[in-house]
Amino acid sequence: MSMQTMRIGELAKMAGCQPETIRFYEAKGLLPPPVRTQANYRQYDDSHAARLHFIRRCRSLGMSLNEVEALLGYQDQPERSCSGVNDLVDHQLSEIDRQIAELGALRAELSSLRARCDAVRPAGQCAILRELTEHA
């Protein structure tokens, strides 16, 4: 099976990101440096595309760059125990639960605030604006 090679724009399009994102991941050491052509163009292959897809998937799940780096370390050393991967995902789940709780509290507060105003009136008489001002 032959390796497909591509330039940064092609890789970015395939991954649904900007070329700057790819350069950023390279600078952070998450993506290995590509081969350079004689004209000094970056030349990526299928392994770069697969790794970039992995990174982008992790980021879409809310993982930090440090967490992605840790997961890549496990991927790069497949003989390691995956207990650290489980711990990382458990931590991410806890973080999401915390955010859901915060959003629930925020929603309740906004809902309560909205309930203070039952009619359209001049802004100077708006109960919501008055409440926001008094508790600023």
Image: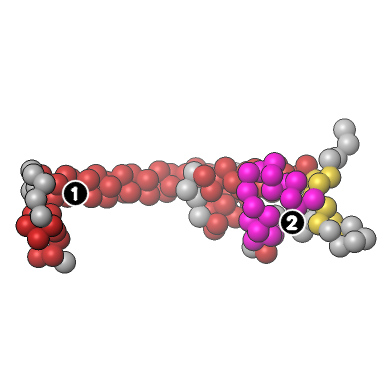
Residue that badge 2 annotates: 32
Q: Amino acid at mark 2?
A: Pro
Q: Which residues are magenta?
A: 7-26
Q: Residue at x 28, y 47 (%)?
A: 103
Q: Residue at x 17, y 50 (%)?
A: 109
List the single residue furthest toward the right: 38
Q: Where does the image place residue 70, in percent across and percent down from the top left?
A: 58, 53
The one nearer the camera, 130 or 50, is 130
Quadrant containing the C terminus in the rendered view: bottom left
Mark nearer the N terminus (1 vs 2): 2
Q: Where does the image place residue 83, in percent across and percent down from the top left?
A: 53, 44
Residue that badge 1 annotates: 110
Q: Residue at x 73, y 46 (%)?
A: 11
Side (left or right) of 52 relative to 65: right
Side (left or right) of 97 relative to 20: left
Disc 1 packing (10 Å; few <14; some 14–19; many ≥20): few
Asked if the stretch drawn in magenta spans residue 74, the answer is: no
